[in-house]
Amino acid sequence: MKRLSLVTTNRLSPHGNFFTLCTFPLAVDMAALFQEASSCPVCSDYLEKPMSLECGCAVCLKCINSLQKEPHGEDLLCCCSSIVSRKNKIRRNRQLERLASHIKELEPKLKKILQMNPRMRKFQVDMTLDANTANNFLLISDDLRSVRSGRIRQNRQDLAERFDVSVCILGSPRFTCGRHCWEVDVGTSTEWDLGVCRESVHRKGRIQLTTELGFWTVSLRDGGRLSATTVPLTFLFVDRKLQRVGIFLDMGMQNVSFFDAESGSHVYTFRSVSAEEPLRPFLAPSVPPNGDQGVLSICPLMNSGTTDAPVRPGEAK
């Protein structure tokens, strides 16, 4: 029984008349680009006295000494690209410093833009767990809406679509187009992975959660360390422990956003999510040393606050 391996905030008024649900994905992309351009890849905070490396990346002056040095030399390796930067070519980037300062000042407004819009629930999916994909150490509720790890291996049929080593499961239905929203109650779980993956991801052997391998997930580790499965990992910071996670997939805009579903606060957005093949909801409860842990539960459909019925995906499994 194997844990999944990882390769090594923000609001919108429900009554606002500027950013509607239609423009929300564009607002997410713009805000994410602003934050990406002004963040240090070492400390994940806003850039302070940014220093430009030869590869084009920038890090805080205080983080320069954290970069790995070239073997047998004093030149530095970029933590993102592993490209060597000569120390005498590293320069202070005052233009980027001004940009980061302005974006930091705009942070309260960015938070308001990115809050989870209650109208997203118009796109709720009546999701269930696909038992045919479940690892044999997973215990699934009779209604196919809750899952947890167990100590005893279940005697399930050996299917091609079943994860045989990594303890995870996919949700149904699959998504080929449109917008889709669902929420997962993570409760007291100290470790979990949630998000989406390509239909074609490998099911056999140990799974590595990376965007390069077709997984767009947010992970909790060690009871509080939150990260997005980018390469390298993007560490995330939230104001409080997540109890219910909202996931909003927009196939047209090719992004998937994660929210604290209770407060509406934005957690992270993946951009350039592949829409070339169907995507599936992905869930993985933790596998602590004692073999037991909290339950991951798909939340029931909620009133969207509109007269529209929940929109189901065009293609069900």
Image (cartoon, rainbow, N blue to C red):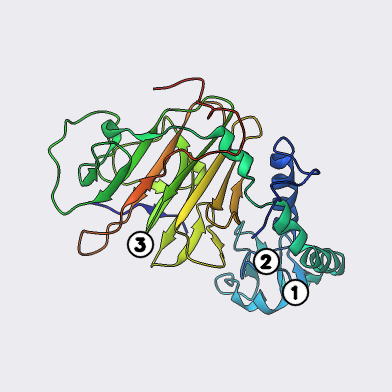
Could you tell me the amino acid type at mark 3? Thr
Q: Secondary structure at mark 1?
A: loop
User: Measuring 14% from the left and 46% from the top, which residue is drawn there?
Assistant: 153
Q: Secondary structure at mark 2?
A: loop
Q: Nearer the viewer, residue 41 or 127?
A: 127
Q: Which residue is mark 3?
A: 188
Number of the label disc, if any, that sits on residue 180? none
Image location of residue 219, percent across then percent down: 45, 55
User: Measuring 44% from the left and 67% from the top, which residue is drawn there?
Assistant: 224
Could you tell me the amino acid type at mark 2? Cys
Q: Which residue is mark 2?
A: 40
Q: Quadrant of residue 222?
A: bottom left
Q: Give the crowd class for mark 1: few <14, some 14-19, many >=20 residues within 10 Å.
A: some
278 on left or right of 134: right
Q: Give the crowd class for mark 3: few <14, some 14-19, many >=20 residues within 10 Å.
A: some
Q: Give the crowd class for mark 2: few <14, some 14-19, many >=20 residues within 10 Å.
A: many
Could you tell me the amino acid type at mark 1? Glu
Image location of residue 144, percent across then percent down: 29, 36
**Can you say which quadrant of the picture contains the C terminus?**
top left
Q: Is residue 303 visible?
A: yes
Q: Secondary structure at mark 3?
A: loop
Taking 272 as reference, is 48 above or below it? below
